[in-house]
Amino acid sequence: MNLKFATTLFLSIFISNLSAQNCTQINSANMWEINDIINTLSASGGGCIEITPGDYYLNQLIVGNGNGSNQFIIPKDNVVIKNYGKLYSKWIIFYLNGVKNISIIGDKIGYLAEDTNFPTNLGNKGILIIDSDNINITGLNINSFKNKGIEVVNSTNVTIRDNKITGSDSSSGAGIAITDALFGGTNYKGGSSLSNISSNFISNSRIGITLNRSFEVVVNSNIVVDNIIAGIALDGSVDGSNDIGTGSQNCVISNNIVKNNANSDRKGCFTDPNTNEPSNDFRQDYAGIYIGNGAQKNIITNNFVRNNYYGISYFEEENFTSTQTSYNNIISNNQVILNKWVGIKLTRTNNAIVTENQIVNNKLAGIQIHDTNILNYTIRNNNVILNGKYGFLCTGCDNANKATLNYFNVLTGHTTKDIELLSEEYQNSVLCD
C-alpha cells in the first residue's frame, strides 16, 4: 500500500473515531490548563478537546505550564483539537514538535491572530510544526502573523487544507512555508516531504506558499492572490539559514489560481545586495510562480496564472552556492494570461521543459529566454498569442533552436530573422500583426 495513502487513511479513521466521542470542553475558565489536559489525553492513548466560541488571549491565559512554552498550545500524540474560538498570541498559537497523529480543525470558524495588545512581533507564527508526522490542519482563519501563517519544518505527511491565511508580510513572511530550516535558526537538513497543501486561500503575504528543500509535496487547488513577491515559490535556500542544499524535488504544483502577485510595478523599490544601492532592475522571483535555486524534477501544471509581474519565472541565482542546480522542471498546460511583463521566463536553468501552455496577452513577451547559461531546454507546442511585443524573446542567448512546433502571434513584430528562424527551420508558426 502506498505510504502516503496509508498514513492519510490512518489519520482519517482516527479522526472519524474521535468524532463519535465526547470532546473535553475548553473555555476561558480552564484555558490556562489546556496543555495539562492535552498531556493527560495523550498519555491515555489520545482524545479530543474542543475550544468553545469566545476570545482567548493566550499570553494572559496560559501560564505556569512549566515547560518554557511562552504560552503556546502544545499538542501531543493522538490528539484532535477542534477550535471554534478566536485565539490571539504575540508569539505562536500551536507549537508541534516531535509529535504524530495530530489534527487541528476549525470548520472555517476557528480563528488565529496576532495579539495587537503587544508591539508587533516580526517573528510570530500561527502554527509551527517541527520534526512531526501525520499532521492535519484544516478549516482555520489565520490572520496577520508577520513571519508565517503556518510553518512546517523537517516533517512528513502534513495536510494543510481549506484554510484562509493572510498578512504574513514581514521580510521573511509567507502564508505557508514548507522547509528544512527555521529562519535564522536550526537547519535540520532532512527536509519536509509527502505533504499536501490544498484548497487554501492565501493573500497579502510576502510569499503565498513557499517550498524550500521539500520533497514530494503536492500544492493543489489553492487560490493565491495579492502577495508581495511571489504567489508560489519552489526554492533551494532559506534566508538566514545558511542552507546550500538541493532545492525542492518531485513536487507537483497543479490546478491553482495564482493572481495579482508582485503586480504593482515595484521597479527600484528593493536594494541590490551586492552594492547596497537601490536597483532599477526587477527581481526575477517577482512572479506568480517562481522556481529556482536547486529546484529539481518538479511539475507545474494546469494552473491559472494571471496579472502577476512575471507569470512563471524559472530562475537560478547567479551566486547560488549549491552544487545542485535546477533541472528537469516541467511547465505544462498552464494558462498564463495578462501578466505585467513576461508570461514565462527562463534564466540560468537546465533541462527545462515548457510545453502545451496557453500564453496570452502578456505585456512584453509570451516566453523569454535570458542568459547564455541555459542548457537543453525544450519549448514545444505552446500557444503564444497577442503578447505585447514578442511571442518568443531570446535575450543574451544564441540557442533559440530549442523552440519547436509553437504558435506565435504577437501585436508588434519579430524581425525578419526571428520569423525565418522560428517559422521555417524549426516548424513554429509565427503571425505578426
Image (cartoon, rainbow, N blue to C red):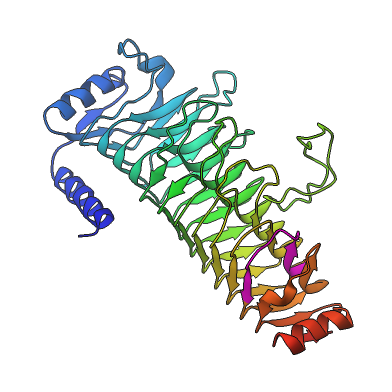
Percent x, y for residue 177?
49, 41
Identify the residue at image location x=54%, y=52%.
295
Viewer-side residue, 212 vs 70: 212
Residue at far front of view: 323
The quadrant of the rendering that contains the N terminus is: bottom left
**Does residue 393 lie above or below 187 as drawn?**
below
**Residue 372 shown in magenta:** yes
**Residue 98 shown in magenta:** no
Q: How many marks?
A: 0
Point out the stretch of residues depicted in magenta: 364-379
Dividing the picture into quadrants, the one containing residue 381 is: bottom right
Viewer-side residue, 228 vs 28: 228
Residue at far left of view: 44
Residue 250 makes an appearance in the image? yes
Percent x, y for residue 280?
85, 45
Identify the residue at image location x=71%, y=67%.
338
Identify the residue at image location x=45%, y=47%.
214
Percent x, y for residue 224?
55, 53
Q: Is residue 360 left or right of residue 297?
A: right
The quadrant of the rendering that contains the C terminus is: bottom right
Percent x, y for residue 222?
48, 57
Q: Is residue 354 left or right of residue 195?
A: right
Identify the residue at image location x=49%, y=43%.
176
